[in-house]
Image (cartoon, rainbow, N blue to C red):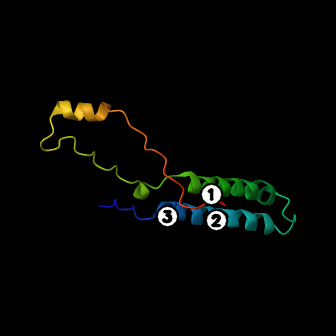
Amino acid sequence: MQPTKPAPRFAFGPRNYRLMWIGLAVLAAGFITMMFGDKDNYGEDFVGITLGPLLLIAGFCIEFAAIMVRDQSLVVAPAPPAPTSVPGLTSADAVAAANAPVVPSAPSAPAYKRL
């Protein structure tokens, strides 16, 4: 009997993607704010010099959090422990089997011929 492989999972979950879209929206708002500030001062006022960069910093922080936050829907539940009781096996036999030394197997002959 072969052990079953776990199904492949994506690195990001729905929460991560939502945070990424929110971060991109905040970044876009920051760039737009810096670009289209007040027309009278050519973007050299509070909106263009202060608010725009603050929105960019917030957007990059949200993007960092979107990458680093672990989505709880992707956490794999631990497998149940293997049964410790085997029918017909006494506790002394189990202790002896657990403490038995591992004997390495002899190396096999190579499958190719040397010239």
**At which x and y percent is residue 23?**
62, 61
Amino acid bearing label 2: Leu
State how far apart marks 1 and 3 are (Cα).
18 Å
Disc 1 + disc 2, Cβ < 8 Å: yes
The residue to which callout 3 is attached is 10
Q: Going by the picture, which residue comes out furthest to the left?
A: 88
- Mark 1 vs mark 3: in front: 3
N-terminal of the pair, mark 2 or mark 3, is 3
Amino acid bearing label 1: Glu
Element on which disc 2 rests: helix
Amino acid bearing label 3: Phe
The residue to which callout 1 is attached is 63
State how far apart marks 2 and 3 are (Cα).
21 Å
Q: Is residue 115 left or right of residue 89?
A: right
Placement of the C terminus among the 4 image quadrants: bottom right
Q: Is residue 32 left or right of residue 113?
A: right
- Mark 2 vs mark 3: in front: 3
Mark 1 crowdedness (10 Å alpha carbons): few <14, some 14-19, many ≥20 = many
| Quarter of image, res 24 | bottom right
User: Depth check: 49 or 81 in front?
Assistant: 81
N-terminal of the pair, mark 1 or mark 2, is 2
Residue for point 20% across, 34% down: 93
Q: Is residue 15 left or right of residue 64?
A: left
Q: Which mark is residue 24?
A: 2
Residue for point 58% across, 56% down: 67
Q: Is residue 16 left or right of residue 91?
A: right
User: Depth check: 70 or 31 in front?
Assistant: 70
Judge whether residue 110 can be spotted in this image. Answer: yes
User: Depth check: 71 or 86 in front?
Assistant: 86
**At which x and y percent is residue 78?**
34, 49
**At which x and y percent is residue 40?**
86, 67
